[in-house]
Image (tube, helix red, strand yellow):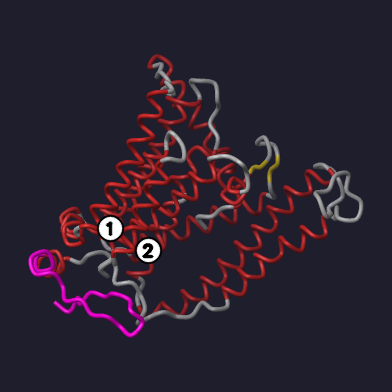
Amino acid sequence: LAATPMVIFLSSQVGTSGAEVTGAIASTAAALRLSRAEHPTARTWLIAGAVLGITALSRPLAPLWVAFAIAVGIGRAGGRAALLRLRAADRPSIAAVTVTAVGIAATALWTQSLSLRTPVLWDRLGRGLAAAVELAPESARQAVGVFGWQSVPIPDAVYWLWGLLVAGLLLAAFAVGQRRDRALLAGSLAVVMASYELLAAAVFIQNGFGMQGRYILPVLVMLPLLAAEVLAVRLPERLCGHAATVAVGIIVMTAAGQFVAWGANSHRYAVGMDGPLWFVPRPAWSPSGGWLVWLLLACLPVVVTLAAAQSCRPVRAGRPHGPLSRRYRAAGAAESVTTRPARTHNPGGMLHWDNSA
């Protein structure tokens, strides 16, 4: 659900928006992984630092999304527990923090040196906020998928499908989450709404660019990931079997939505908006190799996605242990900082931490 058709479209372009959005997804995944009770290995820390640092370099606003991803991770773990986790990891965590800070600082310095800052016209801010509210539905559509020069829409059913699925995911997370989970979800949703309003009113609308969905998409994609993390931890055991069935349905529907979005974009350039629905035999324009080749290639990821959906099974023993628990913060964390958990090597050579305390 985080990887909307627009995410795929932006990632196919020679531009920086794709790197910004996919980096936001990866940064949120890294932050959520570091917030879990399972102690991350040194490799996990280094990968997380690289992801956060590289994402911060993608676009001028990217440091904001990196900061938000980090805030989500801290919110899941708790401030004191996150600090203890950093101290316990020692050099790997220091390296990760350093790489992230360098990426953020480099982008900030680059923005300053090129004078990319835009002035805020405070006397027009009120009108900008009102205009942003009016543009919100169209920005939401663009976040799902409006291609070309914001001129190639996809069928309305795909917009409704994605909106309902994301809303259902968030509502389910609210329903099963604890008070802290709900506060984090509500706070994240509020930050997304405030970010949209402020960016639209104070930056893009005032300076004549117009607000586009891709500008706010990097922070929007974080909401499904956070909701899914809450569900993975808090969902009652008796519902796991039903959750696996629902997951299969969601994966199948999103795979179909991606294919329909690809078809709508291809149809526009093959025969135009009013051309025949089946455009493969007589297109006015076709890419190298012809449309049949690219149609078959477009089917491959759909087939792989559907095959992956069939592997969804009720998960119990392998469920993530969730964020750093109160017990960890009260007892285990202090011991892990002072005495360090015992390290054991499994036959495969992977490093694990003994969390029996």
- Spot occupied by residue 121 in the image (x, y as percentages of width and height): 41, 16
Name which quarter of the figure residue 197 lies in.
top left
Residue closest to the far bottom? 347
- Spot occupied by residue 12 in the image (x, y as percentages of width and height): 62, 48
Residue drawn at x 16%, y 73% is 341
Residue closest to the far top? 123
Tell me: residue 10, above or below residue 123: below
Residue span colored magenta = 334-357
Residue drawn at x 14%, y 64% is 329
Q: Does residue 340 belong to the magenta stretch? A: yes
Give the mark, 2 or 1, whose residue is nearer the N terminus. Answer: 1
- Spot occupied by residue 135 in the image (x, y as percentages of width and height): 54, 33
Q: Which residue is mark 1?
A: 76
Residue drawn at x 44%, y 24% is 116
Residue type, mark 2 in image: Glu
**Along the horizontal axis of the image, is 218 left or right of 155?**
left
Residue drawn at x 46%, y 45% is 218
Of residues 173 and 228, which is closer to you in this image? 228
Name which quarter of the figure residue 29 lies in.
bottom left
Q: How many marks?
A: 2
Binning the other alpha carbons within 10 Å of mark 2 as few (below 14), some (14 to 19) or many (20 upward) gives many
- Spot occupied by residue 234 in the image (x, y as percentages of width and height): 32, 69
Residue type, mark 1 in image: Arg
Q: Which residue is mark 2?
A: 229
Binning the other alpha carbons within 10 Å of mark 1 as few (below 14), some (14 to 19) or many (20 upward) gives many
**Along the horizontal axis of the image, is 336 left or right of 24?**
left
Helix, strand or loop at mark 1: helix
Q: Does residue 30 belong to the magenta stretch? A: no
Q: Quadrant of the C terminus?
A: bottom left
Q: Are marks 2 and 1 in contact (CB under 8 Å)?
A: yes
Helix, strand or loop at mark 2: helix
Tell me: residue 289, above or below residue 196: below
